[in-house]
Amino acid sequence: MIRGTVHFKIEICKGCELCIVACPQESLGLSNKINLQGYRFAELIKDNCTGCINCALVCPDAAITVYREPKSALRKSGKEAVEVK
Ligand code: SF4
Ligand code: SF4
């Protein structure tokens, strides 16, 4: 089983919601806060990301980096996740 997480460059996110629609896990949503451009930005709202990278592939602004690692490895090592994009 793969466990993933995502990091957003919130200052370049335009809140287009493409990543939110593309996520099969419904892990993403729009923040109630706004960035310096005045947009509500996308954020992780659930702890169920699988690291499938769909969100990163559809983002027109390359604002998303996906990290993933097998759950067993995370439990054993507690190490930083591996960057895949
Ligand atoms: S990597 Fe996949 S599961 Fe994780 S937030 Fe992005 S689209 Fe959703
Ligand atoms: S696809 Fe990119 S620009 Fe659009 S809401 Fe998601 S992170 Fe922001």
Image (cartoon, grey):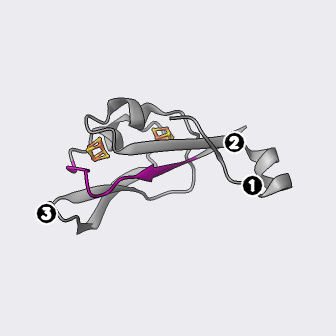
At x 56% / y 56%, what residue is drawn? 47
Q: Residue under label 2, please give it.
A: 69
The amino acid sitting under disc 3 is Gly
- Count of numbered marks: 3
Q: Which residue is mark 1?
A: 79
Which residue is label 3 attached to? 38
Amino acid type at mark 2 = Glu
Say whether residue 81 is left or right of residue 25. right
Q: CA gap, disc 1 to disc 3?
A: 35 Å
Q: Residues within 10 Å of mark 3 (few under 14, many from 20)?
A: few
The Cα–Cα distance between marks 1 and 2, rounded to whole angstroms, is 10 Å
Quarter of the rendered image showing ligand 2: top left
Q: Contact, CB < 8 Å: mark 3 with mark 2?
A: no
Q: Residue at x 57, y 50 (%)?
A: 48
The answer to whether 34 is drawn above or below residue 10 in the figure is below
Label 1 secondary element: loop
The residue closer to the viewer here, 27 or 82, is 82
Q: Is residue 13 magenta?
A: yes
x and y, in percent, of residue 83 in the image = 58, 41
